[in-house]
Each structure stands twice: as structure tokens, then as C-alpha cells.
Image (cartoon, rainbow, N blue to C red):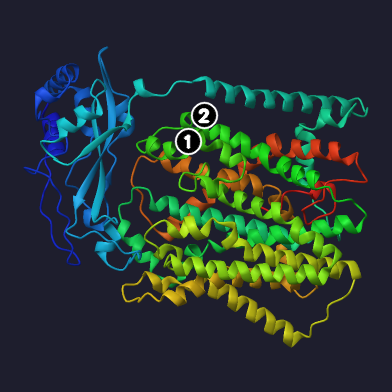
Amino acid sequence: MWLTKVLIVLLCYTSCSYGHRNKFDVNIPVTNSQSVLQPQLYSESNISKTCEVHIKRYEAGISKGETWALQMLDSSANLPSSGILNGNLIYLGDFDTCINIKHEAEISGKYCLGSLPLSSGASKDTSKHRNLQTPEARMVAPDGVLSGMFAVCLPDSCSAEDFQEYSRNNIKKLNFFENLCTSKSTKPELDAGDITTISIISVILYIMLMSTGYEALTSYIQIKPAHPFLTAFSLITNTKKLLHTTSDSGQISCLHGIRVISMMWVILGHRYTKTNMMPMVNRLITFEWFLKKENMIVLGATVSVDSFFLLSGLLVSYGFLVATSKGFKFNIFIYYFHRFLRLTPLLAILVLIHATVLKHLGTGPLWNYFITGLSHPCETYWWSSLLYIQNYVNSSEMCMAQTWYLSADTQLFLLSPLILLPLKRWPKVGLALTGFLTVCSIITSFTVGWIDELYGFIMANQNNDYMKHYYIQPHTRAAPWLMGIILGYIIFDIKQKRSKISINTFINILLWLVALSILLACVFTGQNMLEDTYVYDKFANAVYIALMRPGWALGVSWVIFACITGHGGPINWFLSLPVFQVLSKLTYSMYLIHFTMLYIISAQTRISTYFSNLQMMYDFWGDFAFTLGGAVIFTLAFESPILMIEKVIFGKKEKSPPLRDQATVPEEDQKKIEIP
């Protein structure tokens, strides 16, 4: 019994002594130096009757040392706690213990996260600039309010309002909302949408099983399948195609490596982003991390998307020119339908999953908080995602936010015939038109940056204007794509004429140094915009916005050009490794699912993490492995079968097939490698 009493004392006793650090005080509205859940009813009249009865039983249980009551007390966070001045502001308690509490037949545990606006003594920041060099700026939100989150465990008969009343005696400003509360009784049940999604996936898996069995049987008895459709969903056929590599001269091998590395870079950048949204015991360290130059390799990862835009434009023009040079007729309906058929089935099933069953795929203190943000936009705006227009229609609430790229790239693809047809018939006119449009896109980017007074470095922007008006819009991101169109024409011309480009060693080394310098400059510049000594220069930032991404595309263009003309050396060897051919076939699925995988993993966290580069790399490789495994499943189930069906449908029309927007001529390698 003495151990029980000691436990109660330890749980209820907290210290309220705070010092000054970096001349920054956090004034926490805690009264009487009490625990968040020191059992003491604030106002019985404001709490529902059933909740009041159960809370009294809970308090009595604590006094008697009953296990279930002590578990409920132990599951709640205690405040004050250590690490507040290091940015440790989220206290999750013990989620699993709380929701698994069961006392007799009436009382079960209910876990709620309360949000706590903490006074920082800072005034509201109305500027557009985010300065991360001072403690105030690191910890204070734009409205001048610092927000914490604290866990409370009470009987599940209590509502969020009851939680708030119960806690007011100790923390006056602690706010509770029902969507941040979890108990076994509130677990969502399967609805019609969930059942529909599960049924569709089950049917597809059944078809895969039957198709695989059929192919195995025909192979065993050594007869030819009656029709290619019967093996379109076969794991045997699709796995062979996935693992197949080729050294065919018709492909641009280095693109595979560029695509895979860019995809890994995207995942790495998003891992850091997601971790920064999660509870951390040393949050302030992350902002010091932002100011270290070597970490720009992560902060500058957004240029990886410009590599995808470049590859997309290159493959659109190269595929078009290769197809038309072989006498294939251009049919704009098939051209567009081919694109829609290749991209949409996998996207559609993922949108459906997000809108329905995603909420059932995990639990955790922050699960509802994060997953609702993923599922709600897909429930409401699923149609704009499938029409590839959500970067214009609902840019603030995009379904699968990473698919802004698909929208922008598809919009550029729809306009591509206006460039490709002149490029084929009048090459000089087509090149001049493409160059003119590239300049127009650069000028547009400059204008947007100037008018909206944007900071060139994405992290330095305080509001969302950078994302909405510049980052996700095709007219401001078109320059790398248009440069890819030009590069695709150059590569086609070189291969068509079978001409050998001769560059002497000195010039080759010089061009490599220039290209690498441009690439490094695009990644490692802009960090000074986060410093408190930085003075905003409207013109300089607009120029940075206009030229940084085309500059990156220019550097990558040289890498591709050098590789295909025999001047890539070991870099070409590395980028052309067979393993990249296999992984590149998975990059579309990886791009679509990685963001959700990161959310699912992060939203199930039970404890605060410790931020460090070593920990982030450890998490990244886990993210990559999970994403890769998921991509294999989704590729074999929802992407490869569509490619096989498309081949059967369009393969019969040899005189007028869909024009390929890929980099490889062989059918087995004609994947959607123009996108990640």
C-alpha cells in the first residue's frame, strides 16, 4: 500500500520553477502548481450527470489505490514538465493504457488531447518573413500564440466539454475538441463507402489470383493462353516485366537513375517535414538545424520536382518525335486518352482509399488529428483530383497534396500538341516557340514573386502565398518542362542522325564544373533568408524565384546530354545501373503512396522523438523500405495490368497507336517515367 501512496504523490506533484533562457519566457497558465489531472472537480454543475458520477468513482478509486484509477491517472500528462524551453510542448501521456482501461461494465478509458495556447509575450507577427534565428520566432506561431498539447484520460462517458470543465481548475485555457478524443466506443465502424472500397480491392485481388493461377496452369501444361487479357493481372507476367532490364540502345538509361534518386530525395525531404510536425523533446534544435549550411541538402530538396518536370518534357517530345518518325499518325484523342488511362486507375484507387478506409488503418494520440486532414479533402474534392485541376480549384484543400504535381504536369501535357506539332513540321519555329514560352514562364515567376513579395527560399515565407501562387502552378513551373521539350528534340536529333558529339577533355571538364556549380548553387543558396540580419530585397528575391528552378533544370540537362553523348564517365555508369531500371518502374506508385505512408507511420507515434540527422536517416530508410514494398503491391495490382490491357487495345492499331511519352522504345520499359 505504501508503494501506491508513493505513486500517487509522484504523479500529482510537479514543480513550477522556471528560469530564463535566451531572454525568453514562456508563461504557462497553470494555477496552484498542480498536475493537469490532479483529481479535483472544478464545477460539478457544468459537467454531465453520468460523467460526474464516473469521475467521483474515479477519484474514489485513486484514494483506494485501485489499479484502473491509477492507470487512468498515470495515462494523463503532467504539467509543468521538463523541456518546455527546448520546445517540448506536446505531452502525449499513455494512449494505449488509457483506451484499454475497463472497470466493471460502466467505466472505460477515454483519451483526449487538449490544446493549450501559451502566452509568449510576443506580439502578433504580421510580416511575410519567417525568421528562425531567435527563440521567440522559433516557438511562436504567426498570431503571437504558442500552442501546446496535453493528454487527459477520463471515463468515456465524459464529452470534450466535460474534459474542459474538469481541467479548468488547473489549466484555465486548456481546450478540448471531440475529434481529438479517442476511446474504444468511438472507433469508426465500416460504412457503405468503406465496404465498397474493400469490395473493389477484394475483386481485383481475386482477379489477380485467378489470372496468376491460369498462367501457372497454362505454363505447366505448356499451352498458350487463350487471350492476353487473361494474364493481364497475373503476378507471374507482371513480376517478370517489373524485374526485366535491358540495354537497348533506344532508351536513355541515365534517366532511370535520375528518377530514382530524385524520388528518394523527395521522400527524405518529406520525412524531415513530417518529423517537424510531430512531438519532439528538442524542437528548438530543429530551428538551429535550419541555419546550418550543410543541411541545405535536405531543405533544398524541392528542386527534385524540377527534375521530374524536366524529364516529363523531355520524354513527351522525344516519344512524340520517335513515334512520328516511324510513320505513326497523330490522333489527339488517343494521345490524351493514353495519358489518362495510364495515370488515373492507380490514382483513383488511392483517392478512394483516402476517402474511405484510411481512417481504419491505425490508431494513436495524433491519429485523428493528422488522418482527418488527409481523408476530408478526398471526401470533398475527389473529383478535382481525378480531373487534374485541384491546383487551381481547391489548392488549399488538395486530396493527396503531393498530387499537385500530377495536376500541373497533366495541364502542361494537354498543351503539348501546340508545341510538338510545330516542332515536328518546322523545327526552328518549334524551338523558337518553346524558347519564347520558357522566357515567358520565367518572367511570370518573377512577376508573381514581385507582386506577392515572396521570399525566394520556401522556408522563409510566413504565409501560404508561395505555395498557392507560385509553387503548384503550371505557368510558374513550366520552364523546366519546356527546357525538357528542347532537350528531347536535341536527343532525338542526335540519335536520328547517329552523329557523334565530340568534346575535348578540357571543355568537357569545364562544362561539368559549370553544371555542378549551378546545381550546388540552386541547392545551397537561400538559407540566409532565414537569418534575423537578412534585409528583404524585393528584386533579388523575385530574380531568385525566376531563375533558381530553370537553373537546376539547366544543370540536370547537361548531365543527361553528357551521358547520352559519351561524356558522362562514371556518372553515366552509375545512373544507368540495372537496379535503377527496376526501381524506376516503381517511382509513380512510390510518389503517390509515400506521403500517406509517412503520415500513417507518424500519426501512430506514442512518444516524443529526439531530433537528429542520424535519427532522420534511420527513419528515412524505414520510410523508403515501406514505400518500396507498398509500391510493388500497388504497381502489380493497379498499374501493370492497365499497361498490359492498354498494350492489347492499342497494339492492334499499328497504323495509329498512341504516341509514347516514354524514354524507352521496348514495350516492357514503356512506363510512366515522365513522372515520379
Q: Nearer the viewer, residue 262 or 327?
A: 327
Q: Nearer the viewer, residue 226 or 65?
A: 226
Q: Nearer the viewer, residue 603 or 58?
A: 603
Reply above or below: 33 against 272: above
Reply above or below: 52 against 177: above
Provide residue 527's location: percent of width, then percent of height.
43, 71
Residue 249, numbered label? none
Instruction: Name the outermost residue toward the top.
Output: 105
Provide residue 625's location: percent of width, then percent of height.
57, 46
Q: Amino acid at mark 1?
A: Ser
**Mark 2 secondary-structure assignment:** loop
- Determine the image quadrant of residue 567: bottom right
First in residue order: circle 2 vs circle 1: 2
Provide residue 290's location: percent of width, then percent of height.
39, 65
The answer, for residue 206, to whether it is visible in the render is yes
Q: Is residue 530 left or right of residue 158?
A: right
Residue 356, numbered label? 2
The residue under label 1 is: 375
- Rendered residue at 19%/33% (across/down): 164
Q: Residues within 10 Å of mark 2 (few under 14, many from 20)?
A: many
Q: Amino acid at mark 2?
A: Thr
Reply above or below: 299 against 110: below
The answer, for residue 617, to whether it is visible in the render is no
Provide residue 61's location: percent of width, then percent of height.
15, 21
Q: Is residue 286 left or right of residue 665?
A: left
Q: Disc 2, disc 1: CB below 8 Å? A: yes
**How far is the residue under mark 2 from the one under mark 1?**
7 Å
Instruction: Name the outermost residue toward the bottom.
Output: 506
